[in-house]
Every structure is written in C-alpha cells, then in structure tokens.
C-alpha cells in the first residue's frame, strides 16, 4: 500500500532566485522543483533554457513575477562548444548524424572573419526542434512526427561573438563560442551556421548560459545546493524583487503619494523624462512598482499590491512595516 502523499503548505514568497539550471531539466521542471523547495504560492521563469543547456535561469516568485518580462527582453550571454565536421538533425548532440565532412585547415584570420560575419543584426530561421508554436503546437512536436514546417527568418542581434579553436573531450576539432545576443537567438542555429561558414559543418556539444541582463551565473545556486539547505536558508537565497529593476531610475514617494500611486494615480514632480523608473515608498524604503515619467508626470505601469508590500516588509522584519502598509491602505 502506498503511503499518503504529504501535502505541501504553500506560503507567500517574493523575490528572485538565480538558479544554475542543470542539464536534462526543462525550464519548467526546474521552476516546479524550486517552487516546491521554497513552498511558494506563485512563481514563473524568465524564458526557456533548453534541457541540453545549463546555466543561469532567473526564477521569479510572488511580486517579482510582475517584472519577469524585463528578463525575457534582456540580452543573454552564452558559452558553447561547436564540434566541427559533423551535422546533426537537431544541431546538437541529441540528434542523429545527417552529414559528416572533413575539417579543413582553418586559420585564425578565417575564424575572426566568420565571427565578424555573424556579429550585429542577422536573420535566423528557427530550428524545427524548438518550442516555437505553429497552430498551437510546438515545432519540436512536428519534428518528432517527421513533419517539416516552413519557418520565416527572424531578426536577432549578436552583440558580441568570440570564436577560438579548441578540442572536444575526445580530442576532435572544435570551436569555442562566447556569445552576447538579443532575446530570441538560437545558439544551436548560430553554431550550425558558423560551422557551415567554416566549410565543414558542426553541431553543439556543450551550451551554457553565463548571464542574462545584469545577472551572472557566478551568483546562481544549483538545485542540489538549494535542496541541501533548510527551509529558512532557502528563502535567504532570494534576491529582492527590486533586483529586477537595477537599471531603472529611482523615485521615492512619501506615504500619501505612495498610496495614490498604488491606486494607479499619476503623481507630479520635478523629475526628468525617463522610460524605466523604479518607485519606492519611505519609512522604510519599499518597492511600490515600476513607472515612466513624461512631462513631470509619474505614470504607473506595474504595481505591487499593499498586501504584497506588507508581506515583503514583515518577512524582512523591517521596523515601520505595519505602519507603512496601514498608511498606504488608508490612503487607498
């Protein structure tokens, strides 16, 4: 007889977990595992990372989910190893081999020229083995059924591309790729295109995301490390919600203005125009939401609720938390 499953008591959790996603996990698998470990009520990830890729994956909890789009739109950094001379159906080590070619002598100058060729705005055809949807189905579902679907090329930007010679674990010729790119870039496709430009083809045998926006993989924690901690220590691994707004201008409002701002009302002040603004209250400083400034008006775009603010401040045991929350609710 099977033992009854233990019901996990969920709780409000707010903040950002920088996860070093392991190989073999989908982004959603990793999210659900972290959500269970933190016993969190609400969570979301900031864009998919292939199961065959490891590296930094910001996970947003509670109030932070309101700002996850910022990381979806952020530039990404990757390290990859491109094995030369062998093409696969999926452009990575998981797919069947579809072509083998000898690897010619490639000079450092040729490698540098190929890097220049793929730096800047480029057009990419999304791979069939991707999560991109067509008529409600992911492309990889068509691919598994042996169906090739026509895909339109999409514009992406490679901000920086560094290529250098290396070898695979079994001593075969390869190229190390260091990439800084816009959202929506398929590194497998980039690797395949680089291999074709070098005259021998290739496929990725390693892919690791080393950064997204201002977050770096050196700040990330693995699932195994997170699981080894006790429940309260796990909460200590969360970055505050405002870490998602680190590149925003900062505006601080008094209690009365804070309450009106949280009700969706615009506030006036001697502020210069700005597209991205993080708005805080006072006594103590607490994130209220995001906004933009036009013509001296502070215009709300994403707002925390008074309950979320109170939960965050009480969790931090910040003096004045209840006073601030009460003042906000009274103003509302």
Image (cartoon, rainbow, N blue to C red):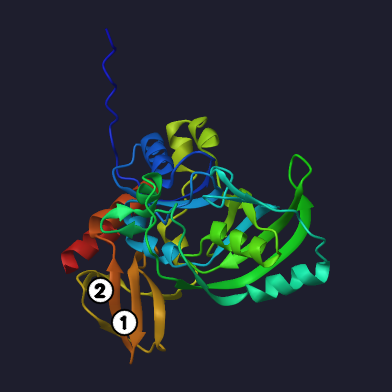
Classify residue 209 by image quadrant.
bottom right
Q: Quadrant of the C terminus?
A: bottom left
* Left/right of residue 52 with respect to residue 294 in the rendered view: right
Quick check: 69 left or right of 264? Answer: right
Say if mark 2 contacts mark 1, CB within 8 Å. yes
- What is the quadrant of residue 288 in the picture? bottom left
Q: Where 101 falls versus 244 (above or below)?
A: above
Residue at x 40% of width, y 81% of height = 275
| Viewer-nearest residue: 173 or 14 | 173
Q: Determine which quarter of the picture holds residue 188.
A: bottom right
Q: Farthest residue in the top direction?
A: 1
Query: Could you tell me if residue 205 is visible in this image?
Result: yes
Query: Residue 279 in the image: x percent, y percent?
Result: 37, 72
Disc 1 secondary structure class: strand
Q: Nearer the viewer, residue 156 or 231?
A: 156
- As measured in the structure, the alpha-carbon distance from the residue carrying label 2 to the one carrying label 1 is 8 Å
- The number of callouts visible is 2
Which quadrant of the figure contains the N terminus? top left
Residue 212 place in picture, x, y as percent: 53, 60
Neighbour tally class for label 2: few under 14, some 14-19, many 20 plus, Cα within 10 Å: many
Between discs 2 and 1, the one toward the N terminus: 2
Q: Is residue 332 left or right of residue 147?
A: left
Q: Residues within 10 Å of mark 1 (few under 14, many from 20)?
A: many
Query: Where residue 56 sits in the image (x, y, percent)?
Result: 54, 51
Query: What residue is pinned by disc 1?
Result: 298
Q: What numbered label is drawn on residue 14?
A: none
Q: Which mark is residue 261?
A: 2
Horizontal and vertical percent for residue 75? Answer: 52, 67
Residue lying farthest bottom?
A: 295
Q: Is residue 286 visible?
A: no
- Provide the secondary structure element on which disc 2 rests: helix
């Amino acid at each position: 007889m099977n033992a009854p499953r233990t019901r996990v008591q969920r709780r409000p959790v707010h903040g950002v977990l920088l996860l070093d996603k392991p190989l073999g996990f989908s982004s959603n698998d990793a999210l659900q595992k972290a959500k269970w470990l933190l016993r969190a009520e609400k969570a979301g990830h900031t864009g998919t990372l292939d199961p065959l890729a490891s590296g930094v994956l910001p996970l947003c909890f509670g109030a932070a989910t309101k700002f996850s789009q910022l990381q979806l739109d952020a530039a990404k950094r990757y390290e990859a190893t491109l094995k030369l001379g062998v093409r696969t159906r999926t452009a990575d080590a998981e797919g069947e081999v579809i072509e083998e070619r000898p690897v010619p002598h490639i000079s450092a100058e040729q490698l540098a020229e190929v890097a220049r060729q793929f730096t800047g705005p480029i057009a990419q055809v999304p791979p069939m083995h991707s999560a991109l949807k067509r008529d409600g189905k992911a492309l990889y579902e068509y691919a598994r059924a042996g169906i090739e679907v026509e895909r339109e090329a999409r514009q992406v930007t490679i901000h920086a591309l560094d290529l250098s010679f290396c070898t695979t674990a079994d001593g075969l010729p390869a190229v190390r790729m260091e990439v800084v790119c816009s959202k929506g870039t398929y590194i497998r496709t980039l690797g395949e295109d680089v291999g074709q430009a070098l005259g021998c083809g290739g496929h990725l045998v390693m892919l690791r995301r080393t950064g997204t926006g201002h977050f770096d993989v050196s700040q990330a924690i693995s699932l195994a490390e997170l699981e080894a901690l006790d429940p309260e220590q796990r909460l200590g691994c969360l970055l505050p919600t405002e870490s998602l707004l680190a590149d925003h201008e900062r505006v601080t409002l008094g209690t009365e203005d804070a309450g009106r701002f949280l009700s969706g009302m615009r506030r006036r002040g001697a502020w210069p125009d700005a597209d991205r603004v993080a708005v805080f209250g006072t006594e103590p400083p607490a994130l209220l939401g995001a906004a933009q400034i036009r013509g001296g008006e502070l215009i709300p775009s994403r707002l925390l609720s008074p309950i979320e603010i109170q939960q965050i401040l009480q969790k931090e045991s910040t003096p004045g938390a209840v006073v601030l929350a009460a003042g906000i609710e009274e103003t509302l």
